[in-house]
Image (spheres, rainbow, N blue to C red):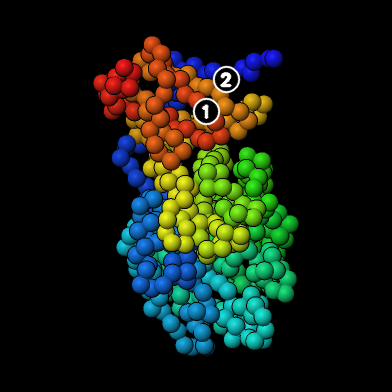
Amino acid sequence: MKKLKKIVLVFCVFLSSFLVFLIPFGAHTQGIDSRFGINAFVSGRYEQQELDKPISVMKDMGIGFSREEFVWGSIEPEKGFFKWSAYDKSTDMLSSSGISILGVLDYSAPWATEDPYRDGADKYMPNITDWQSYVGKVVDRYKSKVRYWQIWNEPNVATFFKPEPNASQYLEILKSAYEIIKKEDSSAQVVVAGTSGVDAGYLRELERLGAADYFDILAVHPYSFDFYSPPESGFLDDMKNAERLAEELGNKPIWLTEFGWPTDDKNGLNEDLQAKYLTRTYLLSYQFSDVKKLFWYDLRNDGNDKEDRENNFGLINKDYTKKESYYAYKNLISVLNGSQFISASINNENGFLNFYFIKGDSKIRVVWNVKKESTVILDDSLGNLKVLDLIGNGVIPQYKNKSISINVSDSPIFIIEDKKLKNQETEKLRN
């Protein structure tokens, strides 16, 4: 029986090929500069008396951006009658916590549509004059706390744009909102509605109609629609398509305003795989320079039914107990927030992936293997390497002479060369 070969990579000088690029080691890019976002929907999915709980969870993880809906029908349930208190409170609490807001302006107020009593009335085309009035009032009220506004959500599917997707109608919504937003706050940035999937046909139709003049940031929702396939199987192709579309639409930056994997018992993942896929997706995204922010969907399970997919996308359960993905995201942010991406190498034949970063005086390498377990051997003659697993726990490697051996699987490992780590701290592990 032929013995499987292990992959051995020897680094005599750990990551010696890095470019010199220094960022203060303690740098922590929060809020507006952060790559790390989440769909929290604090205003609409939590009781007012418990808002401190989700915000505390986000602060603990180090989340920089929260995607928040400003639902027209809730804010203005009747024409000219506004209810601001819930949105005032959540916006103030997020802002004071250092968490920036991506505000989603959606959907129609039923009273502003042709038939307010039909099913799903809020997903039908609104009266544009009423829509502009709502947009202007929301932006004027919150412009000191919200700099990014997203117009609608997934208008390329009938679930969110009835009776069926219509790019011309969506453009009317987008253009009218853009003009009002820029009038109210010239510094604000307008994010196009995230499409369900990377819908090239719909986005190219918008481009043909002239939509590129009416938004600043392209948004897509690159879900794996079987909700099981790993990110390496389709995410890379999705991002290549997104970058092509962004260029066609005027070289727009790209935000992934929704993506995620559920942990339902029916067709979802177990919690371990959800955590792995989250981390690997974020890491893979660094290869695409136009991709600036990613928003995991979502923060907390929407319900307790383990058979219902929509109830199980959260990083935490409905009762606030934490899934493994919570710890994985927290670790990812802790290690990579404020870092500079240097390069990546992907070996499709053996499934081995390497990603390299610099953070201040530290060099960071993240490795995983999607096909089989393998081994990495590293020079540690200076005794300044530390290794973390997926959720941030220290990994105790095997020592031989002045080298360390690390087992690598489909769960990313973080290898950090830290100049501040003293030799004597690792001597305890060697002996």
Q: Quadrant of residue 93?
A: bottom left
Q: Is residue 301 positioned above or below 364 on the image?
A: below
| Relative side of 161 to 291, left or right | right
Q: Residues within 10 Å of mark 1 (few under 14, many from 20)?
A: some
* Amino acid of disc 2: Ile
Query: For this rendering, which residue is in front, 364 or 175?
Result: 364
User: The N terminus appears in which quarter of the rendering?
Assistant: top right
Q: Is residue 213 positioned above or below 346 on the image?
A: below
Residue 304 can be seen, yes or no? yes
**Residue found 43% across the figure and 46% down from its top:** 327
**Residue found 37% across the figure and 68% down from its top:** 50
How many numbered marks does the figure carry? 2
* Residue holding disc 1: 408
Q: Is residue 14 positioned above or below 393 on the image?
A: above
Residue 343 can be seen, yes or no? no
Say which mark, if any, is on residue 355: none
CB contact under 8 Å: marks 2 and 1: yes
Q: Residues within 10 Å of mark 2 (few under 14, many from 20)?
A: some
* Amino acid of disc 1: Val
Q: Quadrant of residue 128?
A: bottom right
Helix, strand or loop under label 2: loop
| Relative side of 418 to 349, left or right | left
User: The C terminus appears in which quarter of the rendering?
Assistant: top left
Which sits earlier in the primary sequence, circle 2 or circle 1? Answer: 2
Q: Is residue 19 positioned above or below 64 on the image?
A: above
| Image location of residue 138, percent across then percent down | 46, 75
Query: For this rendering, which residue is in front, 180 or 276?
Result: 276
Q: CA distance from mark 2 to mark 1?
A: 10 Å
* Residue holding disc 2: 7
**Residue found 43% across the figure and 82% down from its top:** 83
